[in-house]
Amino acid sequence: MRDKERQEMSAGNVGPPFVPSAYFRVLSQRPSLLIDGAMGTQLFNRGLVPGDPPEHLNLVNPEIVQTVHTEYLRAGSDIILTNTFGGNRQRLALHNLEGKVHEINAAAVQIAKQAALKFDALVAGSIGPLGQLLAPLGPISADAALEAFCEQIIGLTTGSHSQRAYNSVDLLWIETMSSLDEATIAIKACCQLTELPVAVTMSFDTNRHTMMGVSPATATTALLDAGASAVGLNCGNSLDDNEAAIAEMRQAAPDATLIAKPNAGIPQWRGAELAYSGTPTLMAEFACRFQQLGVRLIGGCCGTTPDHISAMRSALSVSGQRSST
């Protein structure tokens, strides 16, 4: 991390007051907000070589990234996530890009914001896991994890210190977490450095628990207590399992803002191609089922495309009209 960033972190702030987020205002005006779908698979379909980091495209081919954002916005997304899931030092070091954390994240925000402003949509800064277990199970100490998340967040929020709308995210989005400790450290980093809303999703992919054994109810309570504005799930296994996990989260926190961003069903090999079982029609059905469970933020993860999001938009629009009559 650069010396200036270290000084800013230790001082407890990174610049002037943040521009207020539009997230809460928009959320208060609508029964639900539609998030985008998968980014990685869309980039692979456009030539990204498997094994290469999608985040590097923010620097070397931003047009492709913006095209994916635009397709999701045209499909009806109210919120798009920046192309920064693996934009932390640990993951980027696998590709000798650890020195470009700030540059990659700041570029991703500009790319997403330029697309979103044309559709009056929101941009969430995506923050994924570090990719290594925390001590004592792995090599990353809590302090090192906090520093890594802070470094990425500084890159994601640089523009939030100015009045330039095209440089600022509207909220921070911690996703695909398995470890509750790692998730709470990421929340701590967000709250230390910003006043932005923080959304957090866990992946309940092991018998309706995370890989680290965290249940939906336990995650809900702990994440809200840590400072999250919205909590929920992404990725996971079947749509039915994700629906059951959401029901547990709703029971644990009846008034919480919940998130459902599941995969498009279960992946299956069809020859040399990995395909997902969830059709746009099926995802639209589950979008309405999630909405009936009180989920306010609904989208798709692995295997979802702009076609899935478009079908979900249509279904949620009809469902919202019915609920208001």
Image: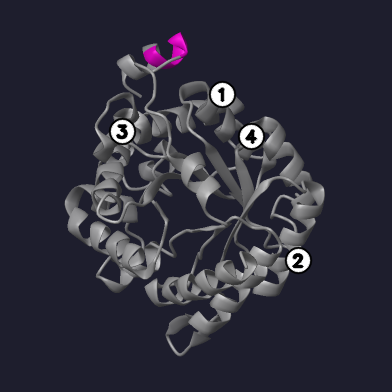
Q: Which mark is residue 143?
A: 1
Q: In the image, is residue 203 part of the stretch drawn in magenta?
A: no
Question: What is the secondary structure assignment of the residue under circle 3?
Answer: helix
Q: Compute the Cα span from label 2 to label 3.
A: 38 Å
Q: Amino acid at mark 3?
A: His
Q: Earlier in the sequence, mark 1 or mark 4?
A: 1
Element under label 4? Answer: helix
Chain-order first, disc 2 or disc 3: 3
Give the spatial CA distance, label 4 vs label 3: 22 Å
Question: Residue extending furthest bottom?
Answer: 271
In the image, residue 242 above or below residue 285: above
| Residue pointed to by mark 3 | 102
Whether pointer 4 and pointer 2 mark residues with C-beta atoms closer than 8 Å, the reply is: no
Q: Quadrant of residue 266?
A: bottom right
Q: What whole-number distance in Å separates the C-alpha atoms at marks 4 and 2?
A: 23 Å
Other-residue count near label 4 (Cα within 10 Å), few / some / many at <14 / 14–19 / ≥20 = many
Distance in Å between CA atoms under marks 2 and 1: 35 Å
Tag 4: amino acid = Thr
Look at 61% across and 37% down and name the residue there: 228
Overall secondary structure of the magenta stretch? helix
Q: Disc 4 or 3, which lies upstream in sequence?
A: 3
Q: Which residues are magenta?
A: 8-12
Q: Which residue is mark 2?
A: 244
Give the Cα separation between the discs numbered 1 and 4: 12 Å
